[in-house]
Image: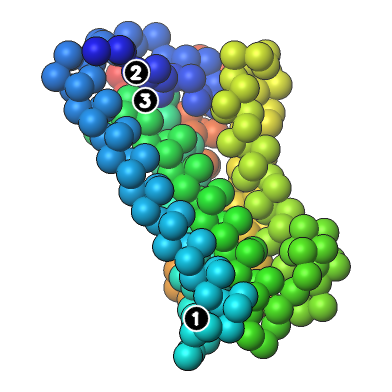
Amino acid sequence: MTKPNVQSAREFSLGAPSAQTRSPLPAATLSNAVSANRWNSLLALALGTLLLGGFVLSALHLTPGPLAWSLLRATGIVAYLALAVTVTFGALLGSRSAPAWLARAQQYGWHGLLSGFALIMGGAHGLFLMVDGKYAQPLRGVLLPGASSFAPLAVGLGTLGLYGLALVYLSTRWRKRLSLKVWRALHLAAYPAFGMLTLHGVLTGSDHLGLLYGTALTCALFTFGLRLTEEASRRGGSPVPGRR
């Protein structure tokens, strides 16, 4: 069996890697990781097929109800939830404050998987806007910020946020080609991207999801602030609260 490419959680640290060495995964766990990757590929194929089918049916007006609107709403919510989880827990990767299960989950590649999933669902969200029965936009309106005839500010923020997320995802894929300093700078684009996508959801205002946006933003700011505090303490030579 070929050993999968497993990344350490320390690679995603905002500061210097932790001095604590993580033990390699046992053979049984590696086998489970390979199996999980296969299931992930199958699920991605099934989901992509369903979304493509919904897009084609909506574009050809072969559905009795507002299928495009339902899929537009669903893909947007799911993409935002996946991104919120990624940003919230991503700040803790490689941190001394991170729970043990987070490092184990990272060894399975959950961080990159969720980031890619959020990017795909966000892209599908934009595509369904092109075939929406009421506010259909041309490709130009979806790809160019501010070019949409419907809520140009909100849609433009969504487009910019998705571009930012794509930049973060690609920076991870190109990790070995970039210096650590450049990679960290690009990776931090996740936070303004998350902020723009939050504003996108709030400004469209078609769904009563204020609690979702407020909770997600609060959690992301909390973990980011916690990580910044830890980094400041480490660089200042003072111990992190709760650690000896």
Q: Which residue is mark 3?
A: 96
Q: Position of residue 192 (x, y in %)?
A: 67, 48
Label for residue 67?
Answer: 1
Whether residue 69 is visible, yes or no, is no
Residue 182 falls in image quadrant: top right
Image: 68 above or below 177: below
Q: In the image as oriented, which residue stretches furthest toward the left?
A: 28
Q: CA distance from mark 2 to mark 3?
A: 26 Å
Q: CA distance from mark 1 to mark 2?
A: 39 Å
Query: Within 10 angstroms of label 3, few (less than 14), some, or many (20 or more) residues?
Result: some
Element at badge 1? helix
User: Which residue shows up at 52% across the image and 15% down it?
Assistant: 16
Q: Which residue is mark 2?
A: 4
Q: Amino acid at mark 1?
A: Leu
Query: Within 10 angstroms of label 2, few (less than 14), some, or many (20 or more) residues?
Result: few
The answer to whether residue 81 is left or right of residue 26 is right
User: Which residue shows up at 42% across the image and 62% down it?
Assistant: 50
Residue 200 falls in image quadrant: bottom right
